[in-house]
Structures are given as structure tokens and as C-alpha cells.
Image (cartoon, rainbow, N blue to C red):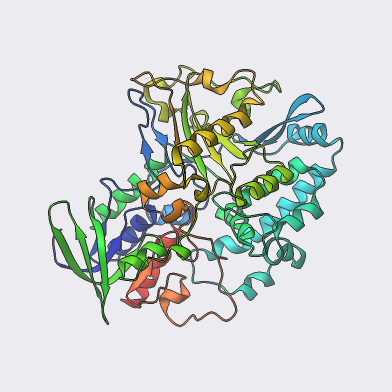
């Protein structure tokens, strides 16, 4: 710290906070970033998760889906994002026969043949292509607005086919999937983008699943999820370098305890491990969840409004990729998103079980092998046949782990691996490497771990339910913070993280928009 008063103090050192700091420091403002942990990056970090093994895993956030290319160019980020050569593979068992639905990137004849083998005709593939072509027009309409002041719902809707607007925006997504597709597997593969980090039925009238679906398909107008070379930590490391080189001060081991707004600025208090510290500033940007921010502002914690996360994350290191019963090359099947137990009916059954308080008997989830796209994360293991593997489970709300966390974690891992083992020639555990202490290289993170490690309330990876990336018709848009979707109840405190109106996922959009609002105000 070089001073006692700053233009802007950013609370939290995640990727959005670093984006804000970089933009503001480049504009000549004095900026202080305060991070509770001993390292920057929040959820977007790379970690040597297993003792004695050099592989660095993207422990929490795992792909870049929404970060605009324009933002990366603005900040001169030295990050390379790589496309996965397989979009998805969905193993299935029908009539005693193992097969798999392959979606190539880019799609070709093998994709059409795979749909035909699953469904018996080309009809579902034609419906698939038609649906995603239409969704692409919505993504193309929304993506350019994400780094601009909020558009109105009316303006966005005016550029989109009314039938598509109904299917994605005004009616529960489940209705559209039933209308457009006949096969339960095809419906489920489409549906899963609506459920990443979101605990809901596909027929939920709140439409939270629809909003999640849109966010996962809108990035850069294509919705493609890409792998950052070097792991997720490469993204935040590059952001930190950019912010620091512009003059922002980045302080770790600084857990903020209070934000005290005044009419023209605020005081921010934190503890550095030795003593309490404090500075004043003209604006505070909050990268923490809105529920946590309210506590820092002096309000009482309200358990009834606390977000609830709903994901299981299992990180693994394998000696080799397992063989699949369908006979597909594992380097094809695991190169993209491998869908497990994600038929439409399975997704709805799992949601119903979890909503009733039970661990789903058949746990839906998906698997990623980032080392097939980026071998550099393996370190010295590259070229030995070893690979990283990540499982992301759906419909595992934090309530399932509240009473007996370890027993529930063990059960969830067993059911997650069972959903994969059903399609393998060999149990996945037989492929696991061991760490320096002889333990299998497998770690499981439940929502309570995400909350404990990252201070995300309830372990909710989006800091709460996502909102539509436009302004409702009657919303107030009088101040820069309101126009950019980053306002709070205080004029001097703005949201810059996933809790901003267009936050969520690894995008930097919340950080960019908060910075633009500050630059308009100061």
C-alpha cells in the first residue's frame, strides 16, 4: 500500500475484480485490490492438487465460455484459448447395445451418422441443426450488447424471431425441448446447458433454467467453451499482470471486514494477519457475492435469502484414459464434454429426488479431459499416457450435504463414478494415479467446500441466480451504475463480480461494466 486514500477499492481478487482494476488503472485512477486469500484468481485458478504429481488442474472454474474476445484484446491479455476437437459425446445403452452420440467440432458427416444410429433417421439431427441455428441468431443479437450499457428487453426481442423468443425467454425451456425433439437423449444433451450450477426443473416457472441456458450459449455470439492453455490460472495470472503493470495495487491475505459508505465515498476495513487496516476511497467495487456484501455493509445475515449451490466437482489424475464399451476412441470421446445420465427424463427424475431431499439414484453429470486439448497442464507427465479428468455433477444441492457432509460426499462420488463405469470396459478407479502418499488422485468438492474455500455463499458458483442480460421494461436506468447493471442500494458501492446483472461464468463482463460505470461517474 502506498497511500491511505484511493479512487477505487476493489473487494475480492477474482478474475472480474482484476478486469475492473486493469481498466481503471489504465484510465489513470488509483486502485487497490484486497483479496482474502493468499493468492489472486478466486475460482479461476490452477492448482497442483495431488502431492508429488506435477499436473496443475483447473480446480474450480474449468472452461472459458463467455469472455469476449474484445475484452481480451482491450487488455492485451497474453492468453491462448483453444477449441476442443470434439463438442460432445454421450454414451448410451439401448436394447442391450452400447453406443454413443458424437457431436464433432465442426459438425460433419460423422455427427449426422451418429444421430441416425441413435434415432433411426435424420429427423433429430435436422431438428438439432435448426434449433442451434436459431439460438445462434439470439446469441448474435445479445453478445455485442454485453460490453455496452444494458439494452432494453424490447430492443433485444425486436431482433429475434418471436417463436424462438418464446422458446428461450418467455416459456419454460422444457416445453420447447419437448416440441422440437422426440428423443430423450437428444433433449437431455440440449438441456444440460440450462442446469450447470443451477438447481431447477426444466419446467420451472421462474425460468432460471432458461437464463442459465442463454448464458451458456451466448459467448462471442457462438457459445463455444474453450480451454485456456496453461489452465484457468493462466487467465487470472495474465489479468493480474495487466492490472499491476497499469499501476493497480494488488494485496493478498487481506480479508475485508467492513465497508462503510458515506455521501461521497467509503471506508474499507480489513485485517492483514497482524493488525486491522483501513483506507478511504471514492468508490468501492464488490467482487464478492451480493449476500456477502450486505454483511460487509453492516446488515444482518439473512439465512432465508442465502444462495444455494448445486454442483459436485471431482478432479482426477489418470494413468491412462479408460476404454469405452461403445468402442469409440477414448481420445475422441473425452476430448469434449462427455454427458452421463443426462437423458431428459433422467435429468427431471434426478431433480425430483434431490428436491425431495435425497441423493439422486442415477446422478447426471459431465466429464472433461482438458489435457487432451492442452497437454502443458500435465507438466512432466505429458507424453506418458497420463491425463487429467474433471467430473461436474448436476442436481446435488448443498442441502444434501448439510447433515452428514462426508457420508453424502462419499455417496455422491460413488454414484458419479457409477454413471461413468456403466459405459467403460474397466472401472475408472483402476485408471487413477496415486499421489506421493499412495492415495488415489481424486478430490471431490461439494457446495460446502466451495463456500469454505472461496466464500461463495451456499457454494453457488454464480453468486446467486443469473438474471437476463437486458433491462426489464420498467427498470430505472438513471445512473451509470444502473445503466451498466452494477448498481447496489449505495451510490458509492458497485458490483463487479458474478452478482452483477451480466455476471456469471468466467467472462470478465461484470468487471468491465463496473469499470465503465465508475469512469462515467468520476
For the residue pair 247 and 360, the one nearer the viewer reads as 360
Q: Residue at x 41, y 30 (%)?
A: 377
In the image, is 299 to the left or to the right of 433? left
- Place residue 247 in its image quadrant: bottom left
Which quadrant: the N terminus? bottom left
Q: Residue at x 37, y 70 (%)?
A: 494
Please say if 55 is above or below 146. above
Q: Where residue 29 sits in the image (x, y, percent)?
A: 25, 67
In the image, is 59 to the left or to the right of 344? left
- Place residue 56 in its image quadrant: top left
Please say if 192 is above or below 22. above
Q: Where residue 362 sits in the image (x, y, percent)?
A: 65, 37
Q: Residue at x 63, y 29 (%)?
A: 333
Q: Where residue 402 sits in the image (x, y, percent)?
A: 46, 47
In the image, is 255 to the left or to the right of 496? left
Which quadrant: the C terminus? bottom left
Q: Is residue 87 among the parts visible in the rendering?
A: no
Find the residue positioned furthest to the right: 121
Q: Residue at x 48, y 59 (%)?
A: 307
For the residue pair 456 and 81, the one nearer the viewer reads as 456
Q: Is residue 157 among the parts visible in the rendering?
A: yes
For the residue pair 61 and 111, the one nearer the viewer reads as 61
In the image, is 96 to the left or to the right of 103? right
Amino acid at each position: 500500500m502506498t497511500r491511505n486514500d484511493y479512487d477505487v477499492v476493489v473487494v475480492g481478487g477474482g478474475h472480474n475484480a482484476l478486469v475492473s482494476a486493469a481498466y481503471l488503472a489504465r484510465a489513470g485512477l488509483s486502485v487497490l485490490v484486497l483479496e482474502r486469500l493468499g493468492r489472486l484468481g478466486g475460482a479461476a485458478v490452477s492448482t497442483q492438487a495431488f502431492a508429488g504429481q506435477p499436473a496443475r488442474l483447473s480446480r474450480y472454474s474449468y472452461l472459458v465460455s463467455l469472455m469476449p474476445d474484445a475484452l481480451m484484446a482491450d487488455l492485451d491479455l497474453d492468453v491462448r484459448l483453444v477449441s476442443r476437437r470434439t463438442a460432445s459425446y454421450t454414451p448410451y445403452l439401448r436394447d442391450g447395445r452400447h453406443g454413443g452420440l458424437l457431436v464433432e467440432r465442426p459438425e460433419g458427416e460423422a455427427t449426422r451418422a451418429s444421430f441416425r444410429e441413435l434415432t433411426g433417421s435424420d429427423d433429430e439431427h435436422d431438428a438439432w441443426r435448426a434449433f442451434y441455428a436459431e439460438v445462434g441468431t439470439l446469441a448474435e443479437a445479445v453478445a455485442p450488447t454485453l460490453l455496452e450499457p444494458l439494452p432494453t428487453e424490447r430492443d433485444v426481442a425486436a431482433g429475434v424471431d418471436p417463436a424462438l423468443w418464446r422458446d428461450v425467454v418467455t416459456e419454460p425451456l422444457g416445453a420447447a425441448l419437448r416440441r422440437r425433439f422426440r428423443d430423450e437423449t437428444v433433449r437431455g444433451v440440449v438441456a444440460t446447458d440450462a442446469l450447470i450450477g443451477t438447481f431447477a426443473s426444466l419446467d420451472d416457472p421462474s425460468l432460471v433454467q432458461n437464463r442459465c441456458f442463454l448464458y451458456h450459449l451466448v459467448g462471442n455470439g457462438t457459445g463455444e467453451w474453450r480451454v485456456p492453455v496453461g489452465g484457468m490460472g493462466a487467465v487470472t495470472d495474465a489479468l493480474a499482470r495487466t492490472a499491476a503493470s497499469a499501476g493497480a495495487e494488488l494485496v493478498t491475505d487481506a480479508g475485508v471486514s467492513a465497508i462503510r459508505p458515506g455521501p461521497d465515498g467509503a471506508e474499507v476495513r480489513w485485517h492483514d494477519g497482524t493488525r486491522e487496516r483501513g483506507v478511504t476511497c471514492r468508490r468501492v467495487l464488490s467482487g464478492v457475492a451480493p449476500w456477502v456484501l450486505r454483511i460487509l455493509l453492516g446488515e444482518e445475515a439473512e439465512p432465508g435469502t442465502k444462495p444455494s449451490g448445486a454442483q459436485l466437482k471431482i478432479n482426477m489424475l489418470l494413468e491412462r484414459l479408460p476404454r469405452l464399451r461403445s468402442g469409440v476412441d477414448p481420445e475422441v470421446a473425452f476430448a469434449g464434454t462427455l454427458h452421463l445420465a443426462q437423458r431428459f427424463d433422467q435429468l427431471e427424475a434426478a431433480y425430483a429426488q434431490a428436491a425431495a431431499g435425497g441423493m439422486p439414484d442415477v446422478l447426471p453429470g459431465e466429464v472433461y479431459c482438458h489435457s487432451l486439448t492442452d497437454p502443458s497442464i500435465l507438466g512432466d507427465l505429458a507424453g506418458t499416457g497420463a491425463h487429467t479428468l474433471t467430473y461436474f455433477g448436476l442436481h446435488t444441492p448443498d442441502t444434501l450435504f448439510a447433515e452428514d457432509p462426508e457420508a453424502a460426499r462419499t455417496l455422491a462420488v460413488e454414484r458419479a463414478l457409477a454413471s461413468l463405469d456403466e459405459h467403460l470396459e474397466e472401472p475408472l478407479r483402476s485408471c487413477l494415479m496415486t499421489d506421493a502418499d499412495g492415495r488415489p488422485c481424486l478430490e471431490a468438492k461439494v457446495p460446502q467446500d466451495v463456500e469454505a474455500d472461496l466464500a461463495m455463499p451456499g457454494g453457488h458458483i454464480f453468486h446467486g441466480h443469473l438474471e437476463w442480460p437486458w433491462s426489464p421494461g420498467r427498470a430505472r436506468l438513471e445512473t451509470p451504475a444502473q445503466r451498466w447493471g452494477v448498481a447496489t442500494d449505495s451510490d458509492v458501492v458497485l458490483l463487479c463480480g458474478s452478482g452483477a446483472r451480466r455476471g456469471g461464468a468466467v467472462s470478465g463482463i461484470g468487471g468491465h461494466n463496473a469499470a465503465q460505470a465508475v469512469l462515467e461517474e468520476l
